[in-house]
Image: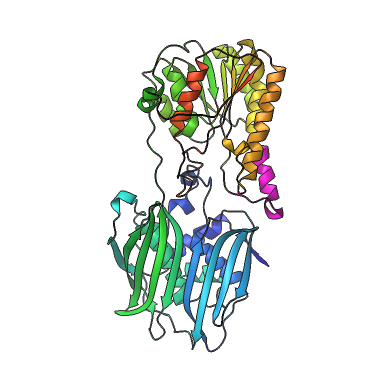
C-alpha cells in the first residue's frame, strides 16, 4: 500500500498552479479560527497525489473517459495517509485515500478504447489576481451562474505534475487542467471563500480538441438542506465542448453572532459577583467568551486567557466596558507549567485572590478512529487536553482554596455517550473529570462543578454536519453562572447536564 503526506510547500505549489488562493488552504491565521485548526489540503491536490501513487499508468489504446471523486473528509499537513487501488469492472479502476480505516477520498476512473486527445497550450494566460469571492448561502440561488476563461499556470503546472508523479498517468494534460479548474471555481468563485469541496465528476468528449486557455460556464442546479451546492458546468475550446462536469461544494457558515446583550437576556446583570476574581481559559471565543461575558455582567473581575486570538480577546474585553465587571487579558499557554506559576504570582500580587477557575480550553477536535495509524495522534490529543486542565489546576488550586472558591470544568456528554470517531475526546474529558474529583478530595474547602453540555456550536464544531443539533454556548454559560451565584458546596462535586435555552 502506498502513502502520501503533505507539506505546506506543496499547497503553495498547487495554489500557484491552479490560481486557487482560498484561505482555508493558504492562511494559518484563518484556519486557526476553523474546526480544522490548521491549513487544509486542497481536495484536488489530495486526488492528484493519490493518483500519482497508484499503479495506474498509461497504456496504448486506452484513454480516460471520466473521473468521479468524492471527498469524505479533509486531509491535513504532516500526516501519513494510505493510498489503495483496485480494478473494478472492465475499463474502470478505483483509487482510495484513507486515514487508517477512515475514508477521506474515493476516485473512480473510467476508460475507453482509443488514444488520448492532445491538449494544446496555445497562448500565455494571466488569471485574475482578485481575492476569492465571499458568497454566503443567502447570496446563492438555483440558476446562479459563473463563467470565464481559465488556464493553469506554467511552469508551476509542470512542477506539480512532476512532484506528484503524474506524467505517466492518465491525469495529464486536459484531465489535470480540468481538475485544477474545478478547484479554482469552487475555491475562488462558486461559492469561494466559504467552500468545502464535496464531490466532482468529469466526462470527457472523445472527439474534442481541447486547448488552453479554455472557456467555462457553471450554474447552480440545486442547493441541499445542509447547504451543499449542486453545480453543472462545461469546458470548451474554440466554441467546441470537450468536458462536462458535475460539482458539489458545501458552504461553511459563520457562527451566530454572540454579544453581551444576548447573554444579558439570559442571565441578567447585577453586582452579585463584585469583588470576585475569575480565571477563564480559552476565553477569547466560543463558550469561554460567553462565560467571560456572563461573569462580567455580575461584577466579577475576569482574567481572560488566550493563546493566539489577540483581536478576539480585545473585542470581548471592549464589549464589556459598560458592565459592572472588569476584564484583564492574559496571553499564555495554560499547558505550560512555568507560565501558570508566573500567572499565580501575578494574581497574588495584583488581584490578591482567585474565586473561580474555569478549565475550558481544548485542542482542535477532528475525528479519529482507534487503530495503529492514529494511536500517536489519539495519545497526543489526550495528553495535550489533560495538560490544559492539570497544569492550571496544579498552579492555581492553592490560591483558589484560600477563598473557598469554585473549580469549574467544561466537560462533555461524550464521557457517557461515546462516539466511535472521537475516542480521544471521550478519554480526555473522562480523564479531566477524574482530575477534578481527585482535586476535590485534596482541597476540601473548594467547591467543584462539572458541566457536561452536548455538542456546542463553536469553532470546534462549525462544519456543515457538525452544526446540526449543536446548542448555543450562551445557554451553557448562563446556566453555569446562575449556579455559581448560589450556595457553594465545599468538598463536593456537582454535575450540570441540563442547559435550557429559555433562561429569560
The image quadrant of residue 342 is top right
Asked if the stretch drawn in magenta spans residue 128, the answer is: no
Tell me how many marks there are.
0
Which residue is painted at 68% across and 38% down in the image?
A: 383
Query: x and y percent of residue 346 in the render?
Result: 59, 18
Residue sitting nearer the eye, 260 or 437: 437
Asked if the stretch drawn in magenta spans residue 380, the answer is: yes
Query: x and y percent of residue 241 in the render?
Result: 34, 79
The secondary structure making up most of the magenta span is: helix
**Vertical placement of residue 348 versus 115, above or below:** above
Q: Is residue 173 left or right of residue 433?
A: left
Query: x and y percent of residue 51 in the render?
Result: 57, 70
Which residue is painted at 40% across and 81% down in the image?
A: 205
Q: Would you say residue 153 is visible in this rendering?
A: no
Q: Is residue 286 left or right of residue 223?
A: right
Q: How is the image coloured?
A: rainbow
Residue sitting nearer the eye, 444 or 168: 444
State which region is magenta: 367-383
Which residue is painted at 48% across and 24% down in the image?
A: 479
| Quadrant holding the C terminus | top left
Q: Is residue 90 left or right of residue 338?
A: left
Which residue is painted at 43% across and 25% down in the image?
A: 317
Query: x and y percent of residue 191 in the render?
Result: 36, 56
Q: Would you say residue 315 is visible in this rendering?
A: yes
| Quadrant holding the N terminus | bottom right
**Vertical placement of residue 108 versus 483, above or below:** below
Amino acid at each position: 500500500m502506498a502513502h502520501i503526506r503533505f507539506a505546506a510547500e506543496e499547497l503553495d505549489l498547487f495554489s500557484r498552479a491552479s490560481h486557487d488562493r482560498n484561505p482555508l488552504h493558504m492562511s494559518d491565521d484563518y484556519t486557526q479560527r476553523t474546526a480544522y485548526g490548521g491549513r487544509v489540503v486542497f481536495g484536488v491536490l489530495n486526488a492528484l497525489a493519490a493518483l500519482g501513487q497508484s499503479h495506474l499508468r498509461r497504456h496504448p489504446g486506452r484513454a480516460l473517459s471520466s473521473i468521479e471523486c468524492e471527498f469524505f473528509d479533509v486531509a491535513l499537513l504532516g500526516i501519513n495517509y494510505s493510498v489503495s487501488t483496485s480494478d473494478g469492472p472492465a475499463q474502470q479502476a478505483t483509487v482510495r485515500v484513507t486515514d487508517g480505516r477512515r475514508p477521506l477520498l474515493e476516485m473512480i476512473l473510467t476508460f475507453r478504447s482509443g488514444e488520448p486527445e492532445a491538449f494544446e497550450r496555445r497562448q500565455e494566460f494571466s488569471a485574475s489576481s482578485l481575492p476569492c469571492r465571499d458568497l454566503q448561502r443567502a447570496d446563492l440561488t438555483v440558476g446562479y451562474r459563473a463563467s470565464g476563461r481559465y488556464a493553469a499556470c506554467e511552469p508551476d503546472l509542470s512542477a506539480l505534475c512532476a512532484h506528484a508523479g503524474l506524467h505517466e498517468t492518465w491525469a495529464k494534460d486536459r484531465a489535470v487542467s480540468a481538475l485544477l479548474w474545478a478547484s479554482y471555481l469552487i475555491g475562488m468563485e462558486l461559492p469561494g471563500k466559504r467552500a468545502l469541496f464535496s464531490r466532482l465528476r468529469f466526462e470527457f468528449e472523445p472527439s474534442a480538441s481541447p486547448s488552453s486557455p479554455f472557456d467555462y460556464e457553471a450554474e447552480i442546479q440545486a442547493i441541499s438542506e445542509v447547504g451543499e451546492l449542486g453545480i453543472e458546468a462545461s469546458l470548451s475550446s474554440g466554441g467546441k465542448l470537450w468536458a462536462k462536469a458535475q460539482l458539489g461544494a458545501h458552504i461553511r457558515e459563520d457562527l451566530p453572532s454572540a454579544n453581551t446583550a444576548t447573554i444579558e437576556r439570559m442571565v441578567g446583570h447585577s453586582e452579585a459577583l463584585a469583588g470576585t476574581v475569575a480565571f477563564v481559559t480559552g476565553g477569547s471565543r466560543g463558550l469561554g467568551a460567553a462565560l467571560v461575558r456572563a461573569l462580567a455582567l455580575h461584577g466579577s473581575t475576569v482574567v481572560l486567557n488566550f493563546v493566539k486570538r489577540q483581536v478576539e480577546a480585545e473585542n470581548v474585553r471592549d464589549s464589556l466596558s459598560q458592565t459592572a465587571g472588569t476584564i484583564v487579558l492574559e496571553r499564555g499557554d495554560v499547558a505550560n507549567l512555568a507560565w501558570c506559576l508566573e500567572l499565580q504570582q501575578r494574581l497574588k500580587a495584583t488581584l490578591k485572590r482567585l474565586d473561580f477557575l474555569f478549565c475550558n480550553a481544548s485542542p482542535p477536535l477532528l475525528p479519529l478512529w482507534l487503530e495503529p495509524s492514529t494511536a500517536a495522534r489519539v495519545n497526543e490529543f489526550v495528553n495535550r487536553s489533560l495538560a490544559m486542565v492539570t497544569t492550571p489546576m496544579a498552579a492555581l488550586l492553592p490560591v483558589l482554596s484560600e477563598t473557598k472558591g469554585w473549580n469549574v470544568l467544561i466537560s462533555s456528554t461524550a464521557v457517557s455517550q461515546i462516539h466511535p470517531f472521537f475516542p480521544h475526546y471521550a478519554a480526555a474529558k473522562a480523564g479531566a473529570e477524574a482530575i477534578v474529583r481527585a482535586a476535590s478530595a485534596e482541597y476540601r474547602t473548594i467547591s467543584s462543578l462539572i458541566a457536561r453540555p452536548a455538542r456546542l456550536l463553536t469553532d470546534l464544531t462549525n462544519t456543515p454536519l457538525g452544526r446540526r443539533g449543536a446548542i448555543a454556548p450562551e445557554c451553557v454559560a448562563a446556566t453555569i453562572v446562575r449556579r455559581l451565584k448560589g450556595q457553594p458546596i465545599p468538598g463536593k462535586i456537582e454535575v450540570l447536564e441540563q442547559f435550557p435555552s429559555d433562561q429569560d
